[in-house]
Amino acid sequence: MRFAKKILELAASLSCACLRLSIYDKFRALKKMQKFMSIVSEAVKASAAEKRRRGRTTATKGGMLVVAGIVFGWVLWPMMLNFAIHRQVALRPGSKVRKIWQKFPFPLDFKIYLWNVTNPDEVTKGEKPVLNQIGPYFFEEWQEKVDIVDRKEDDTVEYSLKNKWIFVPGKSDGLDGQEELVMPHIFMLALIMAGVRERPKAMPIINKAVNSVFRNPTSLFVRVKAMDMMFNGLPIDCNVTDFAGSAVCSLLREKAEGTLQIDGPDQYRFSLLGAKNDTPSLARTRVLRGVKKLKQIGTVVEHDGKSNISKWDDEFCDTFNGTDGTVFHPKLYEDEDVVAFSPDLCRSISSKYRSKSKAKGISTNHYEASLGDPSTIPEQRCYCEAEDKCLTAGMMDLYKCVGVPLIATLPHFYLTDKQYLTMVDGLKPNPDQHKIFIDFEPFTGSPISARKRVQLNMMIFPIDKVKIIKTFPRALLPLVWIEEGIVLPNWMIRQLKLSHFAIGFMGFVKWMMILTGLVMCGFAAYLMTAADGANKATVKSANIENEKMSHSPNGKSNGIKTISAQLPVSVD
């Protein structure tokens, strides 16, 4: 019995020892786990700190990029662009635009249409004129400003304009200029109509002068070759001795230069453009260069030595408005009219914005012009012949301007009172073919495509004292109409497109800088939010583990239940 009891006590002791050993081993393992978790926690905390640091750095860089994009896009780039535009556009010697303005590197399109009178005998008897348009006669117009004088003190440049017209038969619809037309002798008609306007009581003398200078003509109409009427000229023989003829020829001698071709003493030729071809204009023009104020580039300040037009006896009508028509300021948008001074009309013409357009692949603004209406627009009444003698819409009396009783309209009486269309046959007004328009690229102020059109007419009516028109009908008789056009050549269009691309690319760059900066700021916010979340999760996990470890030796919180070693019940 005692032996058995000893065996049981020994077994109990061994069991207790093994149990204690097991608890100790598990305690050591838990301690190691706690240490590991502590290391992990520190590592996570370090990783979170690194994320926050990276987030702050990224946010700083992103913010700087946003600010840089704003400063570059809205401050530096506009300053750089405006500086470059000013350097290239202002009419300072050597600038890019000055070279083009001074001598166009390409010709303008110049077309002439002549009105052929198909029933001259009937018109002489009082019947309505029947007209036939002949044209276009196509010319290259090479334009150059010569005898240039710069005035730095008032930022102006003065010049004479020289136009050279070169006939291009290949673009003239088969016309060669040798076609014979029937037209009124324009010089003879102008002499008669100016006389009746200025000195109606002197018409018998005018009649004698016509007979003297033109050798007793039987008709006002002449058969003439087209090129003679346009450039070569119709002869005027002033080798006369009678009083009436000598008086007229005396006036011719005074005004011949610039208006008539002179063949010798008392020998002249009259044509529409021959006296002006490849000849510098007598009237010089002075314009602002735009060096000091770019928006004023090309503005006319003086013409023919005068600081105002000095033709209309009115401050408004005699004021120079607009440019010389060959240069315009950049950033010309739709809220601003395009205004240009025309020496041939002694007035400025205003073109008004009509719509967005596209020319040669470039976005443009479309402008159109008219001659106004002096009969209804108060500020234009100064263009009237007299207070009680005013033409209607779409017409302009040029007598005060050029000293010849011409009336300007748009071709085919487009936009003109319809009563004048009923006075003649053969006219068909068409907006697309007869309007004045300009397609402007607004940022550079470049005309991509433009057409300037004008028709010259003369009023005819019966005059008792002049035999050759004694029985004429009353009509506004068209004589000629001219179209001057510009379409920028492809090499200039390519330069414009390249400029647009560069400007657009820099706009893209500024927005990319701002967008990239905002994305970086967003990523930085994500990093910092993620770092805070990871740190909180790690701290919570570590707290739980520490709580578990704090109770591990007493056998309650570590999941290990201890068993007390007891002696077995006595077997006695």
Image (tube, grey):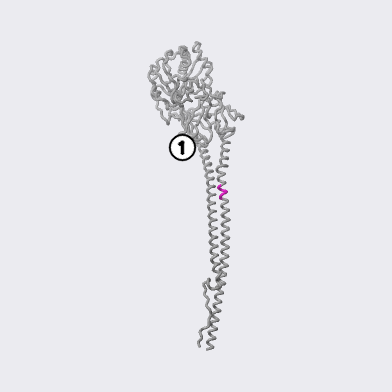
* Callout 1 secondary element: strand
The percent position of residue 441, horizontal first and vertical second, equals: 50, 36
Nearest the viewer among 13 and 133 is 13
Q: Residue at x 47, y 38 (%)?
A: 361
Where is residue 438? Give x, y as percent.
Answer: 48, 32
SS assignment for the magenta stretch, majority: helix
Q: Which residue is mark 1?
A: 358
Q: Is residue 177 in view?
A: no
Q: Residue furthest bottom?
A: 1
Q: Is 264 placed above or below 299 here?
A: above
| The magenta stretch spans residue 197 | no
Q: Position of residue 36 (x, y in %)?
A: 57, 67
Residue furthest to the top: 242
**Can you tell which quarter of the image residue 83 is in?**
top right
Task: Please state which of residues 420 and 110 is positioned toward the viewer in this rendering.
Answer: 420
Expressed as whole percent of the image width and height from the top left, the position of residue 313 reads: 52, 21
Give residue 24's quadrant in the image: bottom right
Q: Is there any visible trace of residue 561 in the rendered image?
A: yes
Q: Nearer the viewer, residue 139 or 525?
A: 525
The total of numbered circles placed on residues is 1
Seen in the picture, residue 75 relative to 10 is either above or below; the reply is above
- Going by the numbered disc 1, the residue's amino acid type is Lys
Specify few, some or many for label 1: CA neighbours under 10 Å numbering under 14, 14-19, or 20 or more.
some
The magenta stretch is: 62-66
Judge left or right: residue 50 versus residue 382. right
